[in-house]
Amino acid sequence: MTDQQSPRMPYWHVYTDAEGVSRQKRCELSSFVFEGVNAEVAPQWNDKMDPSKAGVTFTVLPAGWIGDWHENPKPQWIAVLTGRWFVETMDGTRVEMGPGEIMFGEDQNTKESDGRTGHRSGTVGDQPCTMIVTGLDVEPTVDLPGRFK
């Protein structure tokens, strides 16, 4: 075992509230366990998610790109590799993220308001934004920000 305190990893959770409005909340992964991924590997800090079928997409948003209002196609983890991007939710919150920051997009089943559903996003600055997106085949939740610990 280690004498180190269990780490915490911040993430933004884009979610749908009980009224169908998309929102964002800063949360933390905090259920890390110090163990090897198998018996042959030295222990490391791991916070394992429940197993599910998933698909991985590598994405490059060109400099100056701004997307229309839309919902995440399925619950998905998004990790920024290079560049910067923003996510604006229906409640008016705008968050900018850069390399090493992660977000969980779960704004399915929002209710259209003033021509907006879900969120809109785009690049920040004059560089493309590269990401790895891991879409999960799981049921989206409603009004459970920070459901991952």
Image (tube, helix red, strand yellow):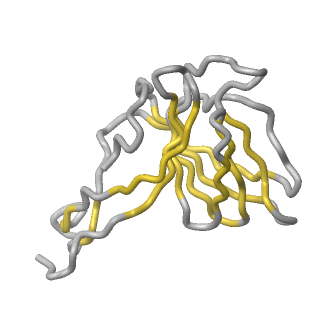
Does residue 88 appear to the left or right of 66 in the view shown? left
In this view, the residue farthest toward the bottom is: 3
Q: Quadrant of residue 128?
A: bottom right
Above or below: residue 99 compared with residue 26: below
* Nearer-the-camera pick, 105 or 16: 16
Total number of numbered discs in the rendering: 0
Q: Residue at x 64, y 45 (%)?
A: 93
Q: Residue at x 15, y 65 (%)?
A: 39
* Nearer-the-camera pick, 33 or 52: 33
The picture places residue 6, in percent across and down from the top left corner, at: 23, 69
Q: Quadrant of residue 116?
A: top right
Report the quarter where the N terminus lies.
bottom left
The picture places residue 20, in percent across and down from the top left corner, at: 55, 21
Does residue 38 appear to the left or right of 11 in the view shown? left
Above or below: residue 113 compared with residue 52: above
* Nearer-the-camera pick, 31 or 48: 31
Q: Residue at x 70, y 58 (%)?
A: 130
The picture places residue 9, in percent across and down from the top left corner, at: 39, 63
In this view, the residue farthest toward the left is: 1
* Nearer-the-camera pick, 14 or 72: 14
Q: Residue at x 87, y 65 (%)?
A: 126
Does residue 67 appear to the left or right of 74 in the view shown? right
Does residue 45 appear to the left or right of 137 in the view shown? left
The picture places residue 84, in percent across and down from the top left corner, at: 72, 62
